[in-house]
Image (spheres, helix red, strand yellow):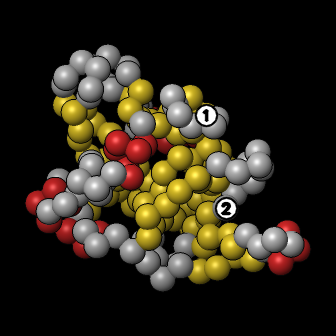
Amino acid sequence: MDDGDESPNVRASSYLLARSTRHCGHCGRQTHVFAIILPAGHETLGVEDDPCADEWEVSPAPTLLSHVSSLSAPDPECLRALAPGYRLDHGRTAEGPYWMNHCEHCEAPLADVDTVEEYDSAFNPARPEGAAAIVLRELSGPFAARCGANTEDLPSFEAMRRA
């Protein structure tokens, strides 16, 4: 995350809510986890040294978001209803709060680095069968958020299942 600016740096006309499972390091049980994927054609804000030169750029590939620190659209209550364990919280190493998963059994926070970003994690599988375990739910309506990281051009995207 950057200088505290919480204005959106990604936006799209729709988004995908991805669902998978992972092991909770606290209680040892499998739990559902969620992530947001923006479809090809979404926009990212290209930040330049001169803020007047910042401009929105169209991305040709789907993008997996992580460290979402603010959510302008959709309504956060809608997202909470669809993904009850995914909510704003403070991570141990993050600079500020971000939307993170929590174990559905013990409520322990599950950091994005272990859930989304690491190779062979719940949303970054090493094998096609891991990608086939991810279920995508397409949601229409605008999406705008600030994220600290994203993974573009997901090699396993086509193997993910549509709900």
Residue 90 vs 44, above or below: the answer is: above
Q: Residue at x 76, y 45 (%)?
A: 4
**Image coordinates for residue 70, horizontal then vertical, percent:** 65, 45
**Image coordinates for residue 100, horizontal then vertical, percent:** 47, 37
Please tell me how crowded label 2 is: few (under 14), some (14-19), or many (20+) other residues with Cα within 10 Å: some
Q: Which residue is drawn at 62% across and 44% down?
A: 69
Horizontally, residue 41 falls left or right of residue 45, namely left
Residue 2 visible here: yes
Horizontally, residue 38 falls left or right of residue 55, namely left
Q: Which residue is drawn at 25% across and 68% down?
A: 156
Q: Looking at the image, which is closer to me, 118 or 34?
A: 118
Q: What element carries label 1?
A: strand
List the residue tagged with mark 1.
97
- Dot 1 amino acid type: Pro
Q: Which residue is drawn at 28% across and 56% down?
A: 119
**Image coordinates for residue 21, horizontal then vertical, percent:** 23, 41
Q: Which mark, by number, is residue 9?
A: 2
Label 2, label 1: how many angstroms apart (C-alpha)?
16 Å
